[in-house]
Amino acid sequence: MDTTLNDRLNAFQQISQRKLVEILDAIAGKKDFIIEQKLMKILDSFIGVSVLKKYGVEKIFKFAQGLKPSHNQRIYAVSCDLIGCQHVFDHIRSENTQTSGLINHVLVAPFVPIAVKNLLEENGLAGLVTLRPLAWEFIKTDGNVLSLETPLFTDLYYHKDTRLLPAMAKALWSLRMVLGAPNFTFTMGKHSQQVLKMVSDLHESLGTPSPKDEFGALIIMDRSQDLVSTLLTPVTYLGLISEVIDINLGNATLGKSQTKLDPSQDPVYSEVRDKHFSDAFPTLRTKAKSLKTEQENMQSMKLSEMKHYVQTTLQKTAKLKQQLEFHISACEAAVNALASQFEDLHSIENLILDCSKRSECLEYILKNIDDHPYRSLRLFSLLSIASDGVTNSEIYPIQKAHLHAHNYTNIPLFYKMETAGLISTKSENMLKRLPNWTSKWVANAKRLKLFPNPSKPLDLKGPTCPSYVFSGSYVPLIAQILNVVNSQITDPKSFEDLANTVGSSYGGIQGPIHPQTVVICVIGGITYSEISACRLIEKAAGLRLVLTSDCIITGTKIIENLQNA
């Protein structure tokens, strides 16, 4: 990725900061800034304490009931869900009864819904509290990856609530204002088409990019078009460690240790992030040996050599050692989490995708539901999707075992998963007992070439097929769309099959992608496996990618969010 593109992506941090600064500047005088916990890292990513103080913020608090701010003017920052807003309104009412003359402003992210305005009135705070929208641009998290940090999956697919789509559209509009207009667009899914229409409307009302600026293609896909990529176990270094350690806005936390996953600052991470896990640990081991040799050589240095080493290399080596220790520890955490179970897990996933040995798959899911509930629920969802549904006789023992092991408060979870499209029920079909029966999902996946050619050997150390992110089992749909769009002239049949898929549409100039910058957007969350798969194509095709989404997700996070909805 060249410097010009990188500089343009870095501009979003400045734009987001300016938006918040304009709000703070409009509220004259000294004030306390009270921030909802889940917004703290987001705001910290684009504005620092020194800037906040420059614009009158005296103290910064993490919101909690019973909090006692010191200034009469308070600014609250809260997300737009009603429960969070109610907690803030409760705090304001409590404070107003104890102290007179308070001035309260509530910044609601990413916009102020009508329901929040009604809630304000119901709490008797109309005229006493000023509501303002708080919106930010895409946040750069990992080189060419941009996240809005506004998870949409549960809203879109469980609540069937599209109110946050305009926030995504506004972010894409800003992206187009910075990068230019795409020469070709491809969308798959109804939400993608809605967002593209919203972006067009914003161009009419707010402005269009300079005609001098353009990029090659814009690809937008609904998460529902490929749930399988969220459910399969990732096998890239970054994909696998994201399953076992917490990664938030590029900050990885493992126990008491924390590191920033920034490829420009961490050469170790830059080298291993997209590697197959079987190749990542040997790479780290080689680096560790090299570092040990360097430290041993230091023992025999002359005084002048030692001085030069301290001045030029020591600090860099110490930082490299710290980074290396973290990544080796992350590898160990991933190995300990899966241990000897990985081969069995991978085998079951392949059987599910092949629609074979169904009873063996169900037995494995049932056996693991006590110790690995999320893993089992992911496999059960994968089974449901790959085989066009599961029967009630298959659901009942899984649900019963899960509730016995993990509390009956989880009764709504299976309904939520069904509503969100992870599980679907069907009646028993006698045709499935035929030896050559295949599901509609498998047939469609084969048509779109999502299963790699079994006759071609897969090199996990030097992969050429994006299916390497799942050890050759499956090609993420978003990576295949990128591949097909990029090869539409040399492989028109594949493009025709893709364009004829239900929910797909395209427009603009067909032909070779030019300029070779492609913006990809997945609505409903993108996975690290998909990011690595797209980067492989980026490197092979000589493209420059900008990967965007509302958030970065895993299959476990999807189920956890549904559980808490």
Image (cartoon, grey):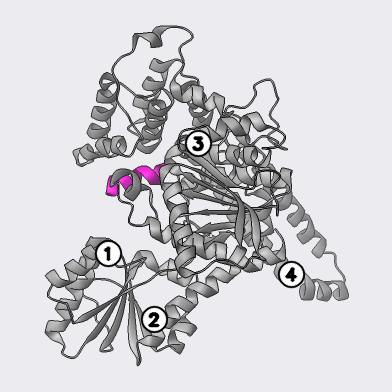
Mark 1 to mark 3 CA distance (whole Å): 37 Å
Amino acid marked by disc 1 = Pro
Considering depth in this image, is 299 or 515 the residue closer to the camera? 515
Considering depth in this image, is 290 or 6 the residue closer to the camera? 6
Asked where in the image residue 405 lies, by quadrant, the reply is: top left
Considering depth in this image, is 544 or 53 the residue closer to the camera? 544
User: Which mark is on residue 482?
Assistant: none
Q: Look at the image and tell me in which quarter the N terminus lies.
A: bottom right
Amino acid marked by disc 2 = Ile
Does 558 appear in magenta?
Answer: yes
> Disc 3 vs disc 2: Cβ atoms closer than 8 Å?
no
> Disc 1 vs disc 2: Cβ atoms closer than 8 Å?
no
Is there any visible trace of residue 79 in the rendered image?
A: yes
Task: Mark 4 vs mark 1: give the one in front.
Answer: 1
Picture coordinates of residue 409, whole percent (x, y)? 20, 42
Q: Which residues are magenta?
A: 555-565
Does 475 appear in magenta?
Answer: no
Disc 3 target residue? 233
Give the mark, 4 or 1, whose residue is nearer the N terminus: 1
Disc 4 target residue? 314
Give the mark, 1 or 3, whose residue is nearer the N terminus: 1
Task: Mark 1 vs mark 3: give the one in front.
Answer: 1
Disc 2 target residue? 23
Mark 1 to mark 2 CA distance (whole Å): 18 Å
Disc 1 target residue? 113
Helix or strand or loop: what does disc 4 sit on? helix
